[in-house]
Image (cartoon, rainbow, N blue to C red):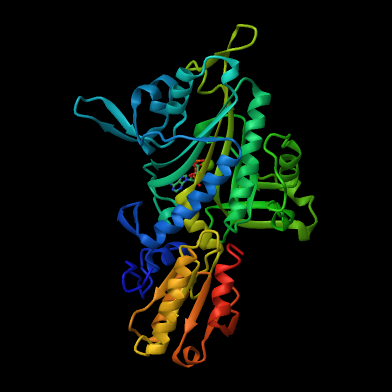
Amino acid sequence: MRSTQFFLPTLRENPTEAQIVSHRLMLRAGLVRQTAAGIYAWLPLGFKVLKNIERIVREEQDATGCQEVLMPTIQSADLWKESGRYEAYGKEMLRIQDRHEREMLYGPTNEEVITDIFRNGAKSYRDVPKLLYHIQWKFRDEVRPRFGVMRGREFLMKDAYSFDLDKAGAKRSYNKMFVAYLRTFARMGLKAIPMAADTGPIGGDLSHEFIILAETGESAVFCDKSFTERDVLSMDIDYESDLEPIVKAWTTDYAATDEKHDAKRFETLAADRRLEARGIEVGHIFYFGTKYSEPLKAQVQAQDGQNVTLHMGSYGIGVSRLVGAVIEASHDDKGIIWPESVAPFRLGLINLKVADAACTKLCDDLYAKLGKAKVEVLYDDRDIRAGEKFAEMDLIGLPWQMVVGPRGAAAGKVELANRKTGEKVEISAEEALNRFTAAQGQ
Ligand code: ATP
Ligand code: MG
């Protein structure tokens, strides 16, 4: 993409409405624009990141055998009356009336709809276990939407649901999601810590929140330092095997949000192992037994001919919140620093002097070759001051910057800079090209 063609409305000044760094940077770097309180439009740069995050979430869900579906945003109130949650959910639910005065709602979550679909489609024990997920917009009329996409009213969520014959089966499904979540967040460069959690309005008796540490997090969290030193991506995972040992290894050390905090137990840790911080919830998983399958009569016939009520779990990831969360975890005073896995472009190609024929020729050539090799590049081909280009490139945080000036171009050289480390090397244009076209996804 050429900057002369790209729609990238950046802001020079800090927007006054933004209280936290990710919100400020998302507005300044032209990722999103608010259209109503807690409701955001995604602009080209932000939408690319959102899709990259969504892709990682999808790949890791698929790897577990969880199958993707797509349920509507608008739901009928009838199912919620059947489950008994229509009244209980309260003002966070956006209730709508259609032209026939039927009660509808904009889905804040999907337990009822998926249970209805599943009870109509599953007949026998052979139809379980099953894991289904979708990635869909939700609406919750939050009292205080704030921090940009972190606590919006309309937001994108991945929500998965599991159906099993009994509690032991449900725990196996839970474990699959637990491990998939560890991998999902790690692939985004995040250290997400699973913490025992309250089950809230979803209900149930087993639940973990996945929390990333950030000063601006909404909840106080307490954990063993060991969580910041782990690596899940180097582990070989077979989702058909028993995952309990992995889940155990990740739930034995102390980790709790303030609601579940046990100060006495925390104090038994050596002082240098205690980590007290603030955290952002990026995912939440629940096992809730028959809470929905009971009232909605989601049953299958067991081997002995008896009807059994299914055991269920639900598993959410805040896809749009993650865009903000990644920025909270990775930025400096110049702007965003995208991890390669979610970056909107892998590199920015900066033409320092568009009027210089050799400089522009080399840039155009590099751009064409990178494009051919399917490397995502933002090519700043605008005729503006070099300082402005550098500042914008730092602000939007692409992992690599390839800088071409008239002097270097004359010698066939470019400067390659790493946004995260600040390291710069002057190398031949050819070598620079090789680095991106040869070793993809380094
Ligand atoms: P929170 O405690 O932050 O209000 P929740 O417990 O109500 O979240 P869940 O029902 O567990 O949320 O939803 C699954 C995930 O969706 C959360 O872990 C979070 O990442 C994301 N999420 C929830 N509410 C919002 C929101 N208002 N804006 C953006 N993302 C959200
Ligand atoms: Mg939650």
**Residue at the location (60% across, 80% down)?**
423
Q: Left or right? Give the position of 157 relative to 300.
A: left
Q: Quadrant of residue 190?
A: bottom right
Q: Nearer the viewer, residue 368 or 343?
A: 368
Specify the quadrant that holds the C terminus.
bottom right
Q: Is residue 355 visible?
A: yes
Q: Looking at the picture, tell me which residue is in the foreground, 159 or 418.
A: 418
Across and down, in percent, residue 74 comes to 33, 34
Count of numbered marks: 0
- Residue at 36 percent of width and 34 percent of height: 72
- In the displayed orientation, state which residue is furthest to the left: 99
Residue at the spot x=48%, y=70% of the render? Answer: 370
Is residue 397 visible in this depiction of the protein? Answer: no
Rendered residue at 46%/73% (across/down)? 348
Horizontally, residue 395 falls left or right of residue 207, namely: left
The image shows residue 239 at horizontal and vertical percentages of 67, 37
Q: Position of residue 49 (x, y in %)?
A: 45, 58
348 in relation to 217, above or below: below
Q: Quadrant of residue 424?
A: bottom right
Determine the residue located farthest toward the top in the rendered image: 305
Measured as percent of width and height from the top left, residue 399 is found at 53, 69
- Lateral position of residue 21 relative to residue 442, left or right: left
Q: Quadrant of the N terminus?
A: bottom left
Q: Nearer the viewer, residue 206 or 422?
A: 422
Q: Quadrant of residue 27?
A: bottom left
